[in-house]
Image (tube, helix red, strand yellow):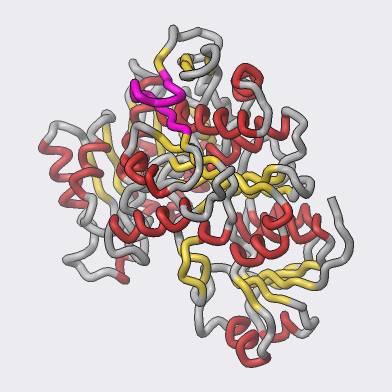
Amino acid sequence: MQTGIRGKVHFSGIGGVAMVGGARLALELGWTVRGSDGPLYPPASELVHKLGIPVANSYNPENLDWNPDIVVIGNALSRGNPEVETVLSRRLRFASLPKWLRENLLRERRPVVVAGTHGKTTTTAMAAWILMRAGIQPGWLIGGQPFGFPFPAAAGAPGSPFVIEGDEYDSAFFDKRAKFLHYLPEVALVMSIEFDHGDIYRDLDEIDTAFERMLRQIPREGLLIICADTRAILLRNHAYCPVATYGFSPDADWRLEPAASDPDAGQTWRVIPKNGKPVTLRRLPPGRHNAQNALAALVAAERFGVSPRDAADLLAEFPGVRRRMEIFLRHQDRIFIDDFAHHPTAVRATLEAARGRWPSKTIHAVFEPRSNTTVTRRFAAELEDALALVDAVWLGPVYRAERLAPEERLDTRSLADRLRARNLPAQAFDEVPALAEALWNGTQPGEIVLIMSNGAFGGLYNILRERSQGSPVPPDPTGSQ
């Protein structure tokens, strides 16, 4: 919905999913938009092409000669970048994406901020899906690639809810506040709080403080929705608004319990509210964590007039999110799955979901230590315990290992040794092509290969596709493929 020409905005670092989403929102709001980045690859290149935005495929001072009214600088950029230096030298107006969103979009809408260490992208997509399908004209900004949406971002109508993924990571090199501190929540969902982002937070207390500050921004007439099954519940007293709890805990205001499995609908879940009639969740992505995500989205939708029964029916049609238990390849009855899990808790939840979906199949876990948390030794024991849930483990090289001192870096060979001591086949690799070759030859028809990474895994996915000489298959969010 356009509201007239706002001005000219340049997105430096437009290749990030959130930055592409921000560019889409700027177009909808009536801005003239350009951008720049390094060479773009799918899906970012596809989204930019679809939007029709002129994008320079390198960072150069000349990219800013069109004199934009403001430059939105992505949080992957820092001092030394040619465009950052040009912005500062020319004294151009600049902002982080979160600040730009607050001032140009969120003040005119009713923000629903989805926060927590795990589950943000899926829960944001679920909440936006319910509200969109219910005809409420919401806006959204999803930090991933949701299926069934024209874009991962839409401005929605002024005065309507705007569902936004609320990351605790910092906003930009010049704006070290957590992103969600910009988002003016009317409603906040908090799923879990664990230590993550070891490059910017010293300890869990610092992360707790960031969340406490976000909760203090919710107005008295707002709503905090918080998971009763995680330590996030400890922060409920930092809100000045009503609090709704959800989860498997018997004390939750919205309680989950397993219901009878349905061959056509997968695992089903019963939602028992303290006030109201029970409803059933069905055809969800597999795993207890996705049942929790769905319930959080359902509670948020009720705030805007969607009945729990209608929300449950709409969730049964939710098409899923790319890289969340996404089946990306089949070959000789082997199923290859891509998942974004990169924290030990998320790895455990993903593997438990896979085991629940395929209880009788051999499951191979392929893990890339890539996040700023898992490239270190901090969670080596927790990662070992999580990976021990499957039948075989394949460890990729530590991402950018040269940036870490050996005594700080995760020792994947030691991790593989410890897994083998638990009678679990495990191998660690220094190069991705060698891993791909061994994986291809070391798995059998009928087995599950679950690849977990929050990045490109050194091209592993493309190597496997090329070896198969096949093509990706559409995902089935129930896992029934």
Q: Is residue 470 visible?
A: no
62, 74: nearer the viewer: 74
Relative side of 141 to 241, left or right: right
320, 206: nearer the viewer: 206
Relative side of 134 to 285, left or right: right
> Residue at point 73% right, 54% down?
108
Residue at the bottom extreme, as displayed: 89
408, 167: nearer the viewer: 167
> Residue at point 31% right, 52% down?
195
Magenta highlight on residue 204? no
Q: Is residue 377 above or below residue 345?
A: below
> Residue at point 50% right, 8% down?
263
Q: Is residue 170 visible?
A: yes
Q: Position of residue 155 (x, y in %)?
A: 74, 50
Q: Is residue 445 above or below residue 121?
A: above
Relative side of 434 to 176, left or right: left
Residue at the right extreme, as displayed: 4
340, 103: nearer the viewer: 103
Q: Position of residue 288 (x, y in %)?
A: 40, 26
Q: Position of residue 227 (x, y in %)?
A: 41, 35
Quadrant in the rendering for residue 53: bottom right
Q: Is residue 329 above or below residue 382?
A: above
Q: Position of residue 313 (x, y in %)?
A: 63, 18
> Residue at point 32% right, 43% down?
234
Quadrant in the rendering for residue 366: top left
Write the start and end of the magenta stretch as one range: 244-256
Residue at the left extreme, as displayed: 421
